[in-house]
Amino acid sequence: MTTDSIPVRATDAGPGTVRKTRKATPPGERRRRLFRHPGAGRQHHAGPVAYILLGLAALVSLFPLYWTMVAASTDNTRVTQTPPPFLPGPHLLDNLGKAWQDAALGKAMLNSLIVAGAIALSTVLFATLAGFAFAKLRFKGRNILLMLVIGTMMVPPQLGVVPLFMMMTELGWGQKLPAVIFPTLVSAVGVFFMRQYLAEALPDELVEAGRVDGAHSLRIFWSIVLPIARPPMAVLFMITFVHAWNDFFWPFIVLDMTNPTVPVALTQLSAGYVRDQSLIMAGALLGTLPLLALFVVFGRQIVGGIMQGAVKG
């Protein structure tokens, strides 16, 4: 009898009875069976209550966009009535064309695309580089520098408006797009976000293997870090792009109406003595459509990146 089997006698033992044997369960397997959850591995299906709650949440989330479309499709008199309209009207195309012409949204959208694209790309690149350095590289003062970066998140941006405006004027960038792009090439939130992801998702063994093969830090970053960091990079790009596209405070200060971004250009629609609410809503709808198109195109990758970063193991 071997050491990995246990004898089991037959119930009617007698002369010539053959002893049956069964393999012993390894200790590790016994522990897994003991602590395994009863529902582990099963498919969990949502019930009707979950679908009802999700449907209500979707309706609440989509209602502002629907109301913007309804207000943009009616005239100013109908929008201000009580109760307001809840069905689209017949003036949507007319209001969209007038808002496009009055606010010069063609040039504004091009400027916003340049500004938001440049800020999003630079933020993703620099934040990933800094996140990799803070997460996996060893150098003196690393923790102090990380605390300083995080500390900048506590400083209100309004405190730096005056010196930043003076700096842009000295550089000759007044009323130009570089004055909007360069102050926001990287964000502390993006650095901290990428550092937290790479600290968990990037094994130290991969970095050490690259060192053994003779790769320097930039080679490791290009060949090892970037493929692993694609999901959070997609999420960070989307968040940064939307924030830069909708930013109004700093572009309104440093740009004028001859070279505006979309939020700055939309202020022209409310500059009259009597505000045309339907025209303002039409301009807001035009300014939102590129973001909706971006999410439709890259939404699957962004949601997949969020889920991949949330599930471990």
Image (spheres, grey):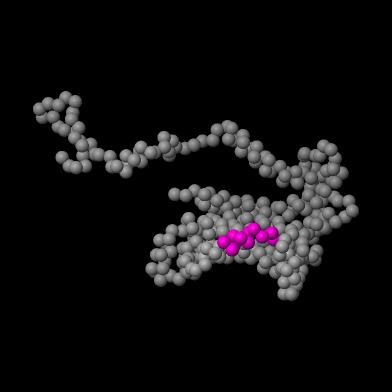
Q: Is residue 201 magenta?
A: no
The main secondary structure of the magenta stretch is helix
Q: Quadrant of residue 157?
A: bottom right
Which residue is situated farthest in the right direction here? Answer: 273
Which quadrant would the N terminus be assigned to in this image? top left
Residue 287 in sight: yes
Instruction: Please give the name of the residue rendered at 18% of the width and 28% of the height, measured from the top-left corner.
Output: 10
Percent position of residue 296, x then y:
63, 51
Instruction: Please give the name of the residue rendered at 77% of the width and 63% of the height, measured from the top-left corner.
Output: 253
- Name the one closer to the observer, 152 or 102: 152
Which residue is situated farthest in the left direction here? Answer: 15
- Name the one closer to the observer, 167 or 124: 167
Q: Quick check: 107 above or below 76?
A: below
Total labels drawn: 0
Instruction: Please give the name of the residue rendered at 71% of the width and 56% of the height, measured from the top-left corner.
Output: 246
Percent position of residue 72, x then y:
79, 47
Q: Quadrant of residue 190?
A: bottom right
Which residue is situated farthest in the top direction here? Answer: 12
Q: Quadrant of residue 208?
A: bottom left
Task: Please report the bounds of the magenta region as a residue range.
Answer: 147-157
Percent position of residue 182, x then y:
67, 68
Instruction: Please give the name of the residue rendered at 74% of the width and 62% of the height, measured from the top-left corner.
Output: 251
Percent position of residue 94, x then y:
81, 50
